[in-house]
């Protein structure tokens, strides 16, 4: 009896936790159907499909979303390649300075974003670098390299490296061994890390706030400014659409993996 | 691929290859993480030589550090207080959730833990703005709390000021808890998931009660997750300024708001640099102390 009560309490606590996590998201979705009075879409007025019929009605918002997507893509590719190479080196070889490299990877994770943002802004200021799209991409690539390297490293532990030797023994050249054996095997880990870095970049606010140029507003920067000026319902529509897309991608990848396992 | 040079002569293969692989990433992190920190340190010791200087020059001026405590001691203490409160709340909400998914999730485990990540797919700022809707003065939650006399209790505890939830310290702590909760849940889940469930059977066979099994077997094994989760919550929470800007009032400004204001509004670079570095120094010492307390030496 006591055990069952405990189980019930645990289940209730877990469900309450999930409700807490999803409450604001429900608000975002619901308010994408709101017809706001005035400039701020923060008070419920009446139901409308208007916003969903004209999701791209606001050219200024679209430009910021497009910029965010481009930054996220550039930093995903750059950090994906560099981070994977670092992870390969750490898992594959024994060499002097490995512990130091590990420390260098962890440091950006244990440093508050505000410190990284302000220090990068000072560096650009010192060297007379104009803040722009590229300073944002450089900053995002920096913290994404760490995340990618650590994620891929975790996935590569327990990887059977003798497969490479086997391929070489069977006469495969180094490039062929990499492209036919190593790369396909590490690909799932690399993809997961790349997705992580894409989502970190597209949602980053604090660092971007410090390193973005005057005219290079990303979507998060736009939302921050909009909270003081005006909050159009299109912001909610675009966010809901992005949410559906990413959840869809997640579900598709799970289904694909299940199908492959069968 | 440079690392495969001389691939047929095994012994020489591993010599320079790792450094070639490491080079791009390590150089990038050095140029855009370490070097900027040096710029920050330099700037924190600089001062304007005259009122007409636009850029302060390096002068071993330690005064900037002294100013931090006298001017912003309150905000500094408040930041760590809020971050600590949020971390404890995240642990209290996140641990049961992670445990429930890991032990009772069954074949739905992956889907359930996937749900924890879903909030990340919407804008962090927009989710925080949603809380201003949920905590607005005439919102259902707030009216219910007012009706139940809960607001009086919270006011007595010093967590809110008047008859509202928005623009109070409580709202900021709640926002921080919300925003960093997944960072607490995921590492705890990972460490719980690794536990061999047969250990629980073994404990039961040895006449351990449910509570003592948890206390003596499960919890100690999940400590690495608790450690990682606490750091991933506490560190970003203590440097955050978004929650305080959206959900807090004048009495809940955090050190992040001060840095942002000094740096981007007042263009006081030496001051902002000194505060940033001090924040980092305090956090690093706290992390090391915490690691010593829990006996976990490995961070990652």
Image (spheres, coloured by chain):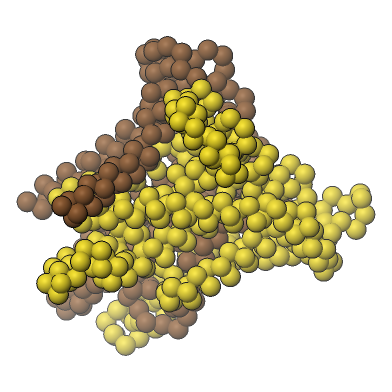
Chain colours: A brown, B yellow
| Residue B17 image offset from top left, x and y in percent | 39, 77
In this picture, residue A63 sits left or right of residue B212: right
Q: Which of B7 and B198 is in front in this view?
A: B198
Q: How many numbered marks are there? A: 0
Q: Nearer the viewer, residue A250 or B148?
A: B148
Above or below, comparing residue A241 to residue A137 in the picture? above
Q: Which residue is drawn at 49% across and 51% down?
A: B86
| Residue B180 image offset from top left, x and y in percent | 45, 49
Q: Which residue is drawn at 47% across and 55% down?
A: B87
Q: Residue lying farthest left?
A: A262
In this picture, residue B153 sits left or right of residue A91: right
In this picture, residue B188 sits left or right of residue B206: right
> Is residue B85 among what the camera can see?
yes
In this picture, residue A42 sits left or right of residue B296: right
Q: Which residue is drawn at 64% across and 48% down?
A: B254
Q: Residue lying farthest bottom?
A: B11
> Is residue A141 among what the camera can see?
no
| Residue B20 image offset from top left, x and y in percent | 43, 73
Q: Which of A255 and B11 is in front in this view?
A: A255
| Residue B216 image offset from top left, x and y in percent | 28, 71
Q: Residue at x 58, y 70 (%)?
A: B285
Above or below, comparing residue A37 to residue B82 in the picture? above
């Amino acid at each position: 009896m006591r055990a069952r009560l405990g189980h019930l309490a645990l289940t209730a606590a877990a469900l309450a936790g999930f409700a807490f996590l999803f409450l604001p998201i429900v608000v975002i979705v619901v308010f994408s159907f709101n017809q706001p009075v005035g400039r701020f879409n923060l008070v419920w007025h009446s139901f409308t499909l208007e916003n969903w019929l004209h999701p791209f009605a606001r050219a200024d918002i679209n430009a910021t979303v497009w910029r965010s997507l481009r930054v996220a893509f550039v930093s995903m590719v750059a950090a994906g390649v560099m981070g994977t190479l670092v992870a390969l080196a750490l898992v594959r070889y024994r060499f002097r300075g490995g512990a130091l490299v590990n420390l260098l990877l962890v440091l950006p994770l244990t440093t508050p974003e505000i410190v990284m943002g302000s220090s990068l802004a000072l560096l650009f200021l010192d060297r007379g670098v104009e803040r722009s799209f590229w300073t944002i991409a450089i900053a995002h690539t920096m913290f994404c390299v760490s995340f990618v390297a650590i994620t891929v490293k975790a996935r590569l532990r327990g990887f059977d490296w003798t497969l490479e030797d086997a391929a070489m023994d069977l006469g495969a050249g180094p490039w062929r061994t990499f492209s036919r054996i190593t790369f396909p095997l590490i690909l799932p880990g690399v993809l997961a890390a790349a997705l992580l870095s894409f989502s970190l970049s597209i949602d980053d606010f604090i660092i971007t706030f410090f390193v973005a140029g005057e005219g290079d507003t990303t979507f998060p920067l736009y939302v921050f400014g909009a909270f003081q000026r005006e909050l159009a319902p299109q912001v909610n529509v675009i966010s809901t659409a992005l949410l559906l897309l990413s959840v869809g991608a997640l579900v598709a990848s799970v289904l694909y993996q299940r199908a492959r396992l069968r | 691929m440079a690392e495969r040079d001389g691939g047929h002569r095994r012994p020489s293969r591993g010599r320079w290859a790792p450094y070639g692989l490491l080079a791009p990433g390590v150089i990038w992190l050095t140029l855009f993480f370490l070097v900027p920190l040096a710029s920050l340190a330099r700037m924190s010791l600089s001062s304007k030589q005259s009122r007409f200087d636009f850029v302060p020059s390096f002068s071993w001026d330690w005064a900037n550090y002294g100013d931090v405590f006298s001017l912003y001691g309150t905000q500094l203490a408040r930041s760590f207080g809020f971050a600590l409160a949020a971390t404890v709340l995240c642990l209290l909400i996140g641990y049961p959730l992670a445990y429930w998914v890991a032990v009772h999730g069954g074949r739905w485990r992956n889907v359930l833990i996937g749900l924890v990540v879903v909030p990340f797919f919407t804008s962090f700022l927009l989710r925080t703005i949603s809380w201003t809707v949920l905590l607005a003065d005439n919102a259902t939650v707030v009216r219910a709390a007012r009706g139940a006399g809960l607001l009086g209790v919270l006011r007595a505890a010093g967590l809110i000021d008047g008859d509202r939830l928005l623009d109070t310290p409580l709202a900021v702590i709640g926002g921080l808890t919300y925003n960093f909760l997944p960072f607490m849940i995921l590492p705890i889940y990972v460490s719980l998931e690794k536990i061999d469930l047969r250990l629980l059977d073994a404990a039961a066979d040895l006449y351990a009660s449910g509570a003592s099994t948890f206390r003596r077997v499960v919890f100690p094994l999940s400590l690495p997750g608790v450690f990682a989760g606490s750091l991933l919550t506490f560190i970003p929470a203590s440097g955050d300024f978004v929650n305080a800007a959206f959900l807090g009032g004048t009495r809940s400004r955090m050190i992040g708001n001060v840095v942002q204001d000094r740096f981007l509004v007042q263009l006081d670079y030496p001051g902002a640099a000194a505060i940033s570095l001090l924040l980092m120094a305090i956090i690093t010492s706290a992390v090391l102390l915490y690691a010593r307390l829990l006996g976990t030496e490995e961070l990652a």
